[in-house]
Image (cartoon, rainbow, N blue to C red):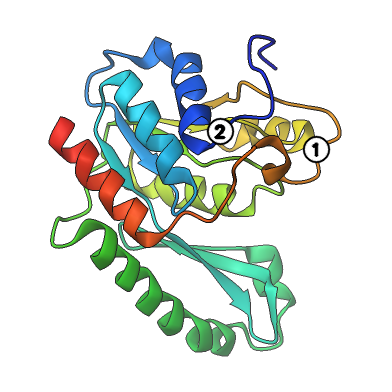
Amino acid sequence: MNESVTLPYTDRRQAGRELGRALKHYRGTPDLLVLGLPRGGIPVAYEVAAALNAPLEVFVVRKLGVPGHEELAMGALASGGTTVLNEEVIQSLHDPERAIETVKPIEWKELERRERLYRGARPFPDLNERPVILVDDGLATGATMRAALRALQPLGPSRRVMAVPVAAPSTAAAFSEECDEVVCPALPPGFRAVGQFYDYFDQTTDDEVHELLASSRLAN
């Protein structure tokens, strides 16, 4: 934990500015790209991208929940057309092919809806040989971030950096094997939920996501 960080953060934008300072060693890195996880990760990623003078894009991830037990993830879909499967869960299912065929079209439809909403007609960027910083507003269980990092891997980035303003210490430690670097300025004890470390933690809207992405594109 960076002792210069005072918790709770005011809001996601202020947390993003703190995270940007923790990532300052990446400023000036050629072809650097900041990817934000919607929706709450986008205000944080916007400030990180501004601090590093890097472009910002959205990385949409949709969990594939087991039918009837949706909280149990058998895999995930992500921007760029990637599907990752949790083999341990898949092998435990009676009919995994049917389960995937049942859920996948529904989640693809929602992923495509969000892609159109956030990115419009702009294609997903080529990540091959590019260093990528993947940003969210915090890390509790880490399920979505883990799926996102695994979905990034086949897209060929030269470096995958996971960056969040605050995380449960044990969860953050577990990510050292999932990516090339973990950057988190606050690892407080007694972690129960991400929202407890923000004064203002209302849900980020689709309109806010769209506006921040558009603003970042204009700046770059």
Q: Quadrant of residue 188?
A: top right
Please name the residue that numbered disc 1 is placed on: 191
Q: Is residue 69 left or right of residue 81?
A: right
Q: Please state which amino acid type lies under the numbered disc 1.
A: Phe
Q: Quadrant of residue 120?
A: bottom left
Q: Is residue 49 left or right of residue 166?
A: left
The structure residue drawn at horizontal position 40% and vertical position 57%, both measured from the top left corner, is 60
Instruction: Please say if the residues under marks 2 and 1 sit with CB atoms less than 8 Å apart.
Output: no
The structure residue drawn at horizontal position 32% and vertical position 14%, both measured from the top left corner, is 27
Q: Secondary structure at mark 2?
A: loop
Give residue 207's position: percent from left, percent from top.
33, 59
- Asked if residue 220 can be seen in this view, the reply is no
> Looking at the figure, which quarter contains the N terminus?
top right
Q: Secondary structure at mark 1?
A: loop
The structure residue drawn at horizontal position 33% and vertical position 29%, both measured from the top left corner, is 49
The number of discs equals 2
Q: Please state which amino acid type lies under the numbered disc 2.
A: Val
> Looking at the figure, which quarter contains the C terminus?
top left
Q: Which mark is residue 164?
A: 2
Relative to 11, say whether 145 is above or below. below
The one nearer the camera, 13 or 171, is 13
Q: How many other residues sit within 10 Å of disc 2, few (<14), some (14-19) or many (≥20)?
A: many
Give residue 80's position: percent from left, percent from top.
30, 57
Relative to 66, say whether 54 is above or below. above
The one nearer the camera, 138 or 181, is 138
Give residue 2's position: percent from left, percent from top.
66, 13
Q: CA distance from mark 2 to mark 1?
A: 14 Å
Q: Is residue 145 left or right of residue 188?
A: left
Give residue 69's position: percent from left, percent from top.
72, 80
Q: Earlier in the sequence, mark 2 or mark 1?
A: 2
- Asked if residue 159 can be seen in this view, the reply is yes
